[in-house]
Image (cartoon, helix red, strand yellow):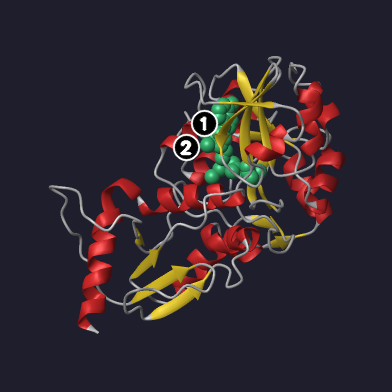
Amino acid sequence: MKVNLDQAEAILRRGGLIGLPTETVYGLAGDALNSDAVVSIFETKGRPAFNPLICHLHSAEAVRRFARTPPSFESLSTLWPGPLTILLPHNGSIPSIVTSGSDLCAFRVPSHPLALELLRRLDRPVAAPSANRSGRTSPVTAGMVEDQFPNLAVLDGGTCSVGLESTIVLCREDGVEILRPGRFASEDFEALGLAVHARSGGVHAPGMLLRHYAPSVPLVLLSPLDMPEPGETESEVTGRTAYLGFGGKSPDFAADEIWDLSPSGNLHEAARQLFFYFDRIAKSGVDTIVTELIPEQGIGIAVNDRLRRAADFAGRRNAGRILARKKKDHV
Ligand code: TXA
Ligand code: MG
């Protein structure tokens, strides 16, 4: 069910949930200061309680009311509003169910105009994970949200312009540690004079440990390596196969359908299309999607991160390569 801004505001004020458009992906949003609303986010999504939620606010000034901010926050927050989530020590006023009991809370100021307007009106933190059932692809249109949650009130903000979840960073005294790749990559932080630290391993985003972003049909990621590793077994790629490529490249096997994330080789376009294409290809009735990594630079790093997770990389890469080759031999 679609709702307008006034209705969305009223639903959030009375502790209900809405589908919230942002520039990254749609969120499943509720009042972060209302524990009942937060509980229903976890229940609706089927999300484990150890996996904390991002709090969305309308400005860096508003975030300062809830967090302690190190010196680097000053320049880091110039990337707001935008596709960036910053982990900061909170001051105790965020319910522990939101942070899964952590001293850190994830904050984000989204740039989508409808989201910003709603957050300004509410002037309180709105908790929102991506509006997908746990483990599934994040929705990038209102229709994709309704597919997963038919009874949810959705504020339709069109197609998400970034198309991948925000970059998550841990804010350190002099810089950042990148916990989840997204639209902003190392060079964007360095350009602000911030240090980009290697992962210390001390803090992680629990959601990144889970199998994730899977389309509803199996995804096989072709490995750049040709040879199987000793002892590896082949898994069967059967039925109708779609090849999801990039930059106009054609597959080196016989695919039943060919899709291209960006025929012109534009990494931003590829990011914007990824989840949308997962959804469309799955609906086209194929049995398997076969895909390859794209150039590992800028937002391409984030696209590849999602592809690896969606494909369950470790188990399948060489099997994909072998079977793809076999198919070609048969042509
Ligand atoms: O672009 C986005 O970030 C979207 C839109 C709706 O804002 N939201 C989103 O939320 O992707 P979600 O819940 O699907 O992913 C948030 C990630 C999870 O991996 C979670 O573990 C991590 O952020 N996270 C949230 N709070 C955290 C915290 N306090 N400490 C460490 N990791 C946290
Ligand atoms: Mg998610």
What secondary structure is found at the residue carrying circle 1? loop
Q: Residue 122 appears in which quarter of the rendering?
A: top right
Picture quadrant of ligand 2 = top right
Q: Is residue 272 above or below residue 14?
A: below
Q: Is residue 24 above or below residue 196?
A: below
Identity, as a three-letter code, of the amino acid under mark 2: Met
Q: Residues within 10 Å of mark 1 (few under 14, many from 20)?
A: some
| Residues at marks 1 and 2, CA–CA distance in whole angstroms | 6 Å
| Relative to 35, 227 lies left or right | left
Residue at 22% x, 56% y is: 227
- Report whether the residue tagged 2 is closer than 8 Å to ligand 1: yes
| Relative to 217, 68 lies left or right | right
Q: Which mark is residue 171?
A: none
Residue 242 in the image, given as x and y percentages of width and height? 39, 74
Write down the residue under mark 1. 205
- Pointer 1 with pointer 2, Cβ within 8 A: yes
Q: Residues within 10 Å of mark 2 (few under 14, many from 20)?
A: few
- Report whether the residue tagged 1 is closer than 8 Å to ligand 1: yes
Q: Residue 282 appears in which quarter of the rendering?
A: bottom left
Residue 204 in the image, given as x and y percentages of width and height? 50, 27
